Image (tube, grey):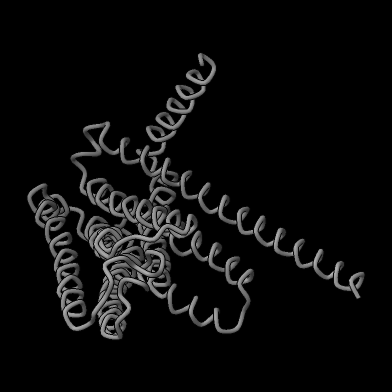
Amino acid sequence: MLSVLQPKANITTYLQYLQSHEIMLFGTLSVGSSCSFFYINSVLLFTLRSKQVFCETSRYILLFNLLFADTATLVSNLMLYFLSSLRIKMSYYACGSLILLSVLTITISPLTLAVMSFERFVAVCYPLRHAAIFTMRSLSIIIALVWSFSFIHILIRVFMLLYVFTTTSLDLHMNDFCSKEAMFFAPIFNDFEEAYSSILFLSVGVVIFASYIGVALVARSASTDKASARKALQTLLLHLIQLCLVLTSTLNTTIMVAIAKTLGRLALMRIYNVCFVCLNIFPRCLSALIYGLRDQTIRPALMQNLCCRWRCSLFRNKSQ
């Protein structure tokens, strides 16, 4: 009897060992890709402030705002991933600060995408009025309105949290790991999230799609710059794809809860790591890929900064 049970115990131990190492491998790949994209985003942010033309052109100013929000979201998501991987539990106040920062920047990204799409529409369809519409003053007002709208969204959530805390007796120290699901646990948050996300992404989607249709119609005319119109259409299409990925990332919780009911822990961890990269990391790096690689003005400066920083770090390692 002992000889029969011993192989089974060895097989169970081996499977646990294999599962733990596979989870560590997926985690390493997720964190590695996140750090790589964070580095590229940081260099692109530095590049957009390194030359005067980037600080005075409307599309680059809006790109900086979008990239700043995406990088902040990337950092907050990476911190939450580290905390859950290390099984660190926090208080509601500390966790709430990280979660609210992530929610704030998530709202800024789709709103900025809508403004950038409208800017491309005006640049192609009304090139003579573009400079008069998108001035430094109007851009400052637009960016301030985007951030104000996001702060209002955060304030609504804060008031809802205070209401829940006053009606429910809770320990200040969380029993679970810090996450959006653990923080916004009441059913009222799910109803608010569904209504808010539906209105926000539907409105932004309409703006991007209408801009795409407008540019496509104008591109057919003989007096239009075909190359500029075609490039604007590609950019708007990429914005629409980016918006869909951001929308899907907001539904990540619903997807994972549905999958957890049918799959085991190892399969769930595999899917979670894949979703973390595809839905939480990759959409925040599309801006760097869309503009950093396609834009003929940004690409030389970005590649130069990337290469210079890589050489500096290489020389430092050799000197040490």
Residue located 52% across and 21% down the image: 317
User: Which residue ends up furthest to the front in the rendered image?
Assistant: 2
Image-quadrant location for residue 51:
top left
Residue at x 80% of width, y 67% of height: 9
Q: Nearer the viewer, residue 319 or 58?
A: 319
Question: Do we see residue 15 in this rendering?
Answer: yes
Q: Position of residue 181 (x, y in %)?
A: 37, 73
| Left or right: 171, with 24 as reference point | left
Who's the residue at 41% across and 70% down the image?
A: 244
Residue 168 is situated, as x and y percent measured from the top left of the image, at 23, 82
Quadrant of the image occupied by residue 46: top left
Residue 22 in the image: above or below residue 211? above
Q: Nearer the viewer, residue 73 or 257?
A: 257
User: In the image as oriented, which residue stretches furthest toward the top?
Assistant: 319
Quarter of the figure that contains the N terminus: bottom right
The image quadrant that residue 200 belongs to is: bottom left
* Residue at (58, 71) in percent of width and height: 268
Residue 315, given in percent of the width and then of the height, sits at 50, 18
Q: Position of residue 127 (x, y in %)?
A: 21, 54
